Image (cartoon, rainbow, N blue to C red):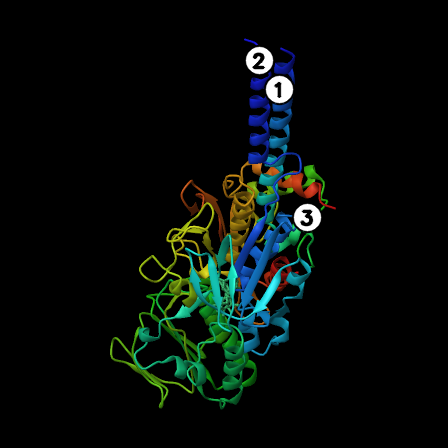
Amino acid sequence: MKYRKIALAVSLLGFASAAFADNHTISRNMASACASCHGTNGHSVGGMDPLAGMPKDEMIRKVKDFRSGAKPATVMQQLSKGYTDQQIEMIANYYAAQK
Amino acid sequence: MTLNRRDFIKAAGATVAFGSLYGCAGGTKGSGNVVVIGGGYGGATVAKYLRMWSDGGINVTLVDPTPNFVSCPISNLVLAGEKTMADITTSYDGLRKHGVTVVIDSAKAVDPAKRTVTLAKGGTLSYDRLVVSPGIDFMWDSVPGLTEAVSESKILHAWKAGPQTVALRKQLEDMKDGGVYALCIPKGPYRCPPGPYERASMIANYFKAKKPKSKVLILDANADVVSKGPLFKKAWTDLYSGMLEYRGNHSITKLDAASQTVEFEFGDKVKADVLNIVPAQKAGMIATAAGLSNVGGRWCGVDWKTLESTAHKNIHVLGDSTAATAGMPKSGHMTTQHAKVAAAAIVNLMSGQPAPDPMVIANTCYSFVSAKEVIHVAHPYVFNGKEFAVPKGAGGVSPSRNELEAKYALAWAKNIWADALL
Ligand SMILES: Cc1cc2nc3c(=O)[nH]c(=O)nc-3n(C[C@H](O)[C@H](O)[C@H](O)COP(=O)(O)OP(=O)(O)OC[C@H]3O[C@@H](n4cnc5c(N)ncnc54)[C@H](O)[C@@H]3O)c2cc1C
């Protein structure tokens, strides 16, 4: 019985960290597509908005406004239409955490 | 039910196995050896991202015969005298700082069974996984009368940036005012759909300023302008009226290199002072030599989830060499996105985990129609379980040519070079 509890705890821990690593990896991959224009990990080398460290809510608002057409843009209105709310949130999370 | 000691060990063991399968606390790192053939858009990006995402766990060796990266994007501005070769050249030192071993040599053969790459100067490299991103090579027999030797010396393509860019610029500078520059475009698919129309526009821009009696003639094997047609045509009418002429449905039937004359399907003939023939294209030669060109003997089939070849296991093909689905252009931007999908897959696979579902990827191609104005085409691509497709209603082009996007086009180049190479 004691063993069983320990086993359960160990396995829950395993699931939790697996889920964390998985989510982080998916967000990282998703965000890397933006880096071709906005710089590796959002560190623009000039002429494009840097995304590194942008507050999460600000990025979510901006991208959703591009997508709805509320915010004018050149390419971002056209590209943002490829993303779901959840994907935008993942990308915003990733970039908010970049220093 | 009570667990005995053995059951506990089994349960805990299963958890450990699960943990390593899906990346425990530290996440995925990966280990082993990756060899990358080609240090262009695809090869450079995948090399850097493999080092970064594996936290230096994966050894990466990149092979390319050219000592520096030279970009095709922006090379049309070099032809027009607006930029220099130095502006489009980047050293591989940034990749070296990421711990990539850069070998200046070309790959001569691949043995998929032994997992080795033979180099031209001698020596072999062993790999656990190989990435092949050699760009395109030309189908010389697509233009009767054209040979590789003629194309290297006289009737240039300048469809790979480097010595050909410098040589074509020189031909344009040497041409007398009042001369004709003719650009022959092959049937698609070819590298960079809007690229030829950008080139014609920029050379017209140069003539307008420096050789106003000269003419640009576009002889296109395609029925009509393949990319951003209305925007290019409007720019040609507004900016280069009387100087630039477009003729569609012009497939070359014969070239006479000595007199610089081309003949076409419908019997017409054109003689040009500077004749720039871009021949039809296929996957880079090494991809074919490695047995990877399994689509029409011309392009490389890949599993879009991992960019792994459908011909050989443990080999991934990126960029222009792939048999891309319709609507996925052969562009530098698209190629870097291939590289990231592949890097994510390879890091997972080399740490014993399944490849992730690919992220949404994107393409943006800016074209200069004059030194000051640019037009773009941009699309997102979503993986549908089999391939990438543009979601309905997404993507598009510039409403009209504009100066703001000329700034973005140059910023795009700087940022994509840095993302691939620094
Ligand atoms: C004029 C022009 C303008 C363009 N403009 C744009 C643009 O504005 N935006 C855009 O996104 N795209 C543009 N492109 C397209 C872009 O250049 C290509 O799509 C991109 O380079 C493809 O990347 P790649 O990695 O497949 O090939 P490349 O970038 O060509 O890299 C291939 C590399 O492989 C090396 N190689 C080949 N064979 C071997 C071998 N056997 N061993 C070792 N190394 C080898 C080559 O030396 C080369 O460095 C343009 C192209 C042209 C020609």
Is the residue marked by circle 2 packed among few (<14), some (14-19), or many (20+) residues within 10 Å? Answer: some
Q: Residue at x 47, y 74 (%)?
A: B200
- Residue type pointed to by label 3: Leu
Q: Secondary structure at mark 2?
A: loop
- A87 lies above or below B222: above
Residue type (three-letter) at the residue carrying disc 2 = Leu
- Find residue A56 and report its image quarter: top right
Residue B151 lies in what quarter of the image? bottom left
Number of numbered discs visible in the structure rendering: 3
Question: In the rendering, at what x and y percent does residue B213 appear?
Answer: 48, 86
Depth check: B357 or B211 in front? B357
B339 relative position to B293: left or right? right
Tell me the residue that label 2 is attached to: B3
- Asked whether A51 or B219 is in front, the reply is A51
Discs 2 and 1 carry the same chain letter: no
Tag 1 secondary structure:
helix
The residue beneath circle 1 is A7
- Disc 2 is attached to a residue of which chain? B
Q: Which mark is residue A51?
A: 3
Q: On the rendered image, what quadrant is the C terminus of chain B found in?
A: bottom right
Q: Are marks 1 and 3 on the same chain?
A: yes
